[in-house]
C-alpha cells in the first residue's frame, strides 16, 4: 500500500498534462498558420485589397473639397432654399482662381459634370473670364454676369452635394436614384435610368445560362458517373477540353460557326431547311450559346463529384421494392444530387453575371452586361466612382446569393 501510495505521489498530476497538450496543440496551429501565411498575404494584396479599394472608390468624394475648399466651407450651413450669400460667391471666385493656378479645377469640374450636365463648361468658362478676384460685394453679380447658371440653386446644391469626404452619389446613380436639393431620394427620369435595366438583363442572362448548363450538364454528369473508368476518363477529357483553350479563341470560334455564312447556316441551307440565313450571332442567342459552352464544365464537375459518391445500391433497392425507374430516380437518386446542383448553379451563375468578353464579342448592343459598363467607365471615361459603385452592387448581389445558398 505504501508503494502504491508512493507511485501515485510520483505520477504527474493531471493539470500539467492538459497544459502540455494545449501547448502542443497551439504549436501545431502556429505551424499550420505559418504554412498558409504566404497564401493569406497573397490573397490580401491580390483579392481583398482590390475589393476594399473598389468599395472605397464608390463612396469617396475628394475632388471638389480639394479644388474649392473655401466654397465648401461657406456652403456648410447653407439651407438650400435660396441662393447663397455674397460670402459664398466670393469664396467660389477665389477658389476658381487658385484651382486654375494649381491645376485642380479640371478634376473638380469633371466631378460636378456628373451631377449636372454642362457644369464643366460653366466652370472652365468662368475661370477663363475671371482674371482677378472681384471687388468686395460684387462677386455675386460678377459670376452671374459671366454665366447665368451661377444664379440657380441647383448649381450650388451640386457643389454642396459633392463636398465630401464621403458620398452616396455613385451608389445611388448605379441604382438610377438621385437626391434633390432637400436631400430626398427620388428615381431618375426614364430617359436617364439605364442601370436597373442593365442589372436585370445581367441577372436574366445569368439565370438563363445557369438553367441551360444544368439541363445539358446533368445527363453528361450522370453518364460520367455511371460509365466504366476507361470510357469515363475519355469523356472527362472532352469535358475539360475547354479549360485548355483560350476564352477569346473559343468565343471567336463561335462567331465563325454562327455567322451568316457560318457552318450552321450553310448546313441548313444545303439541307433545304432554310432559304435565307438565320441571325445566330450578335444577338441574345449567340450570347446564350457561347456562354453555355464556356461555363458547362463548371456545372458538370460539381454534379459528377456528388453523383460518383451515390451508391448504385440505393436505386436497385428501390426497384426491388416495386418502384419504377422514374420513381426511383425522382425520389431516391435526384434528392441526393441536390448539393451538386446547388454548387454547380451557384458557381455558374456567379461566373455568368461577371462575364465581359463573350457578350461583347457575340452579343449586340442590347445584350451587353454590367461588366461591359464597368469596363467602359474604368477605361474610357475614367469615372472610377461609378465603375466602383456598379461593381459594389454586383458584389453585394453575389454575396447575398452565396449567403442564401449557405442557408
Image (cartoon, grey):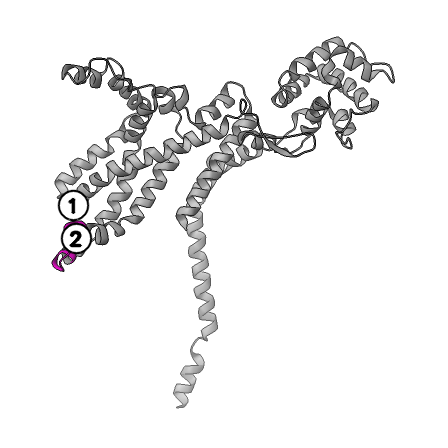
Q: Mark 1 or mark 2, which has the lower sequence index?
A: 1
Disc number placed over residue 141 in the picture, else none: none
| Circle 2 residues within 10 Å: few <14, some 14–19, many ≥20 | few
Q: How many marks?
A: 2
Q: Quadrant of the N terminus?
A: bottom left
Q: Is residue 88 above or below residue 393?
A: above
* Residue assigned mark 2: 312
Image quarter of residue 281 = top left
The residue sitting at 14% across, 60% down in the picture is 321
Residue 327, magenta (yes or no): yes
Per the image, label 1 sits on a secondary structure element best described as helix
Q: Quadrant of residue 349?
A: top left
- Inter-mark Cα distance, 1 to 2: 9 Å
Residue that protrudes farthest toward the right in the picture:
136
**Spot occupied by residue 306 in the image (x, y as percentages of width and height):** 26, 48
Residue 58 shows in this picture? no
- The residue labelled by disc 1 is 226
Left-right relation of 349 to 160: left
**Labels 1 & 2 near each other (Cβ < 8 A):** yes
Determine if the magenta segment contains residue 77: no
Overall secondary structure of the magenta section: helix
Badge 1 density bin: few <14, some 14–19, many ≥20, Cα 10 Å: some
Image-based side of 321 in relation to 22, left or right:
left
Q: Residue at x 68, y 16 (%)?
A: 103
Tell me residue 284's x, y (percent).
Answer: 34, 24
**Does the image show residue 308?**
yes
Magenta-tinted stretch: 318-328
Q: Position of residue 309 (x, y in %)?
A: 23, 51
| Residue occupying image coordinates x 45% and y 69% | 18
User: With 405 as the anchor, is 272 left or right in this view?
Assistant: left
* Residue in view at x 60 percent, y 33 percent: 59
Amino acid at each position: 500500500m505504501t508503494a502504491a501510495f508512493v507511485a501515485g505521489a510520483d505520477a504527474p498530476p493531471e493539470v500539467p498534462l492538459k497544459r502540455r497538450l494545449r501547448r502542443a496543440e497551439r504549436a501545431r496551429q502556429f505551424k499550420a498558420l505559418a504554412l498558409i501565411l504566404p497564401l493569406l498575404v497573397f490573397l490580401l494584396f491580390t483579392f481583398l485589397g482590390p475589393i476594399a479599394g473598389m468599395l472605397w472608390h464608390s463612396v469617396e468624394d475628394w475632388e471638389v473639397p480639394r479644388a474649392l475648399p473655401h466654397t465648401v466651407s461657406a456652403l456648410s450651413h447653407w439651407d438650400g432654399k435660396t441662393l447663397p450669400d455674397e460670402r459664398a460667391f466670393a469664396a467660389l471666385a477665389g477658389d476658381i482662381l487658385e484651382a486654375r493656378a494649381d491645376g485642380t479645377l479640371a478634376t473638380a469640374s469633371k466631378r460636378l459634370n456628373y451631377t449636372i450636365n454642362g457644369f464643366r463648361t460653366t466652370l472652365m468658362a468662368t475661370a477663363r473670364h475671371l482674371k482677378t478676384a472681384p471687388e468686395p460685394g460684387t462677386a455675386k453679380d460678377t459670376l452671374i454676369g459671366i454665366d447665368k447658371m451661377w444664379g440657380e440653386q441647383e448649381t450650388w446644391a451640386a457643389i454642396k452635394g459633392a463636398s465630401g469626404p464621403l458620398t452616396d452619389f455613385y451608389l445611388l446613380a448605379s441604382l438610377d436614384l438621385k437626391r434633390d436639393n432637400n436631400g430626398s431620394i427620388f428615381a431618375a427620369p426614364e430617359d436617364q435610368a439605364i442601370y436597373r435595366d442593365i442589372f436585370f438583363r445581367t441577372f436574366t442572362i445569368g439565370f438563363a445560362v445557369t438553367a441551360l448548363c444544368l439541363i445539358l450538364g446533368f445527363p453528361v454528369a450522370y453518364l460520367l458517373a455511371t460509365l466504366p473508368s476507361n470510357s469515363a476518363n475519355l469523356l472527362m477529357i472532352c469535358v475539360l477540353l475547354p479549360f485548355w483553350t483560350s476564352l477569346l479563341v473559343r468565343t471567336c470560334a463561335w462567331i465563325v460557326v454562327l455567322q451568316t455564312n457560318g457552318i450552321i447556316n450553310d448546313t441548313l441551307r444545303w439541307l433545304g431547311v432554310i432559304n435565307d440565313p438565320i441571325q445566330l450571332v450578335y444577338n441574345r442567342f449567340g450570347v446564350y450559346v457561347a456562354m453555355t459552352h464556356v461555363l458547362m464544365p463548371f456545372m458538370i464537375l460539381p454534379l459528377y463529384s456528388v453523383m460518383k459518391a451515390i451508391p448504385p445500391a440505393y436505386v436497385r433497392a428501390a426497384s426491388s421494392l416495386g418502384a419504377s425507374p422514374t420513381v426511383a430516380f425522382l425520389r431516391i437518386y435526384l434528392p441526393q444530387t441536390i448539393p451538386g446542383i446547388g454548387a454547380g448553379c451557384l458557381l455558374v451563375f456567379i461566373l455568368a453575371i461577371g462575364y465581359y468578353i463573350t457578350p461583347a464579342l457575340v452579343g449586340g448592343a442590347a445584350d451587353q452586361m454590367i461588366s461591359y459598363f464597368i469596363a467602359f467607365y474604368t477605361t474610357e471615361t475614367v469615372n472610377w466612382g461609378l465603375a466602383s459603385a456598379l461593381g459594389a452592387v454586383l458584389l453585394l448581389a453575389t454575396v447575398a446569393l452565396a449567403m442564401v445558398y449557405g442557408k
